[in-house]
Amino acid sequence: MKYTSKYAQAASLKTPCLVIGIFEGRRTDATFDALDEASGGQLRSVLRKGDLRFCAGDTQMLYEVPGIAATRVLLLGLGKQKELDARAFAGALRKAAPLLQQANLRSAAIAMPETGDSYGMVREAVNAIEGALYRFDQCKSDAEPPRHPLRQVIFITHDRRHLRRMQKAAEHGLAIANGSALARDLANLPGNICTPSYLADQARKLGRGKRKLKVSVLEEKDMQQLGMGALLSVSRGSRQPAKLIVLEYKGGKAGSEPVALVGKGLTFDAGGISIKPSQAMDEMKYDMCGGASVLGTIAASAEMELPINVVGVIPSSENLPDGAANKPGDIVTSMSGQTIEILNTDAEGRLILCDALTYTERFEPAAVIDIATLTGACIIALGHQAGGLMGNDERLAQEIEHAGEASSDRVWRLPLWDEYQDQLKSNFADMANIGGRPAGTITAACFLSRFTKSFKWAHLDIAGTAWTSGNDKGATGRPVPLLTQFLMKRARVVE
């Protein structure tokens, strides 16, 4: 999709469809008033008929309105005027985008509301439209793409001062949306296609032709030499070899400390010997969404050419039951030298992450964020609205919280008090890999914290936000928007 910004008077703009917003209580802005005047009062006459309720996302399509050059006018409810912000504007357009697609339009123009931050509203609008029109049909033999897909969206303003910010916002929004789409595509693929080797190949593909992006893949023999006993213990139950995928994006100054993103890449998680219930087990292909989000974020960073150094580390494996698989009671030695008693083989994500976190030390990172679909307990605590956030550095945690708010990809802070560490005590090893039912999300983070003492670290548990179930089953692409916003702020590309 192509997104552009344009200075124009809405009434005289020739377009197949002009989208204009209306607020609850039939409140309008100067752009609508000018359109209504050009139409000889036809627009207000339509409003008075009451077909449109003006709630966010409500729509009414009008055709060949007198005095308006657009072939169609789509009235779009924006909710309460005083509550309009980038999130609300994007939410309304998310509902309207499929209607524009179904109308067989090649192009549409959106009249920007006169209130709110033009940069944030355009960026979130692009992300919302792309997300709403996303399709995954790679595995369908009879896929039918739209006959006349929407190919261009123009954001129009009557104030020239907004044009540059709006155009930059459109570019940024598309890069974030493309990164999210990459993460969604990888996550939606079935486990028999998206294996650790496939994930590694996609990382290599991402690096091709990009001078600033270096991709390397460590094989099991390399991990064996490094002493990654925790990670390799998980892959023993699978015929698919584990991979440690490393991406180095060098957009910043040479020698500048990078931000490291460590993403869990379990391409399928059956639970191992502690096997999961069969119901919804197919959704365990989404256990690599953390790794997918790292690839999507680095793709977005490279597309925008962000002036920052970023390292992505993705430990990737499968977790299956087999004669060689981990058994409850087994003890393994991590790369850090710490020993772990495996009381539940379904708590494998922290086993592959702990070695990846230790490996990340060699890059001397300014900050490390790990991203993982780690615990079902996080869904119980926060539902599907927010990811869980924990860490060992207050400033880093606040940065992530602010990035979540700015990108409409929110997280919620959970405590990481020392008292929780007692739940990980083991009679036979340095620690156990689970801490029991109470505070499962927190004790999982406590486990990881034992491998992060040499750097500033934050942990994102995205078990509740990485995908949706039911009739709308599919990956969401989160937290690519949050992570990209975080990097953009660190690179001083946004305020």
Image: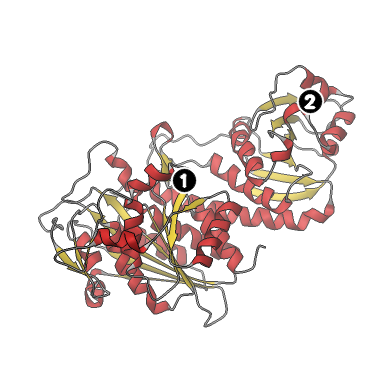
Left or right relative to 403: residue 213: left
Question: Element at badge 1?
Answer: loop
Closer to the camera in the image, 485 or 100: 485
Mark sitting earlier along the chain (1/2):
2
What quarter of the picture does the C terminus occupy?
bottom right
Q: Residues within 10 Å of mark 1 (few under 14, many from 20)?
A: many
Residue 434: give x, y in percent of width and height: 25, 56
- Numbered tag placed on residue 456 in the rendering: none
Residue at left offset 31%, top offset 53%: 267
The amino acid marked with disc number 2 is Glu
Q: Is residue 50 visible?
A: yes
Vertically, is 210 above or below 188? below
Residue at left offset 65%, top offset 51%: 123
Vertically, is 274 above or below 223? above
- Numbered tag placed on residue 64 in the rendering: 2
Q: Which colour style is shown?
A: secondary structure
Which residue reaches farthest top? Answer: 49
Residue at left offset 67%, top offset 53%: 170
Q: Is residue 316 visible?
A: no
The amino acid marked with disc number 1 is Thr
Residue 225, by quadrant, is bottom left
Residue 450, by quadrant, is bottom left
Closer to the camera in the image, 86 or 241: 86
Question: Element at badge 2?
Answer: loop
- Numbered tag placed on residue 476 in the rendering: 1
Q: Residues within 10 Å of mark 2 (few under 14, many from 20)?
A: few
* Distance CA(mark 1)–CA(mark 2): 37 Å
Residue 444: give x, y in percent of width and height: 32, 57
Mark in front: 1 vs 2? 1
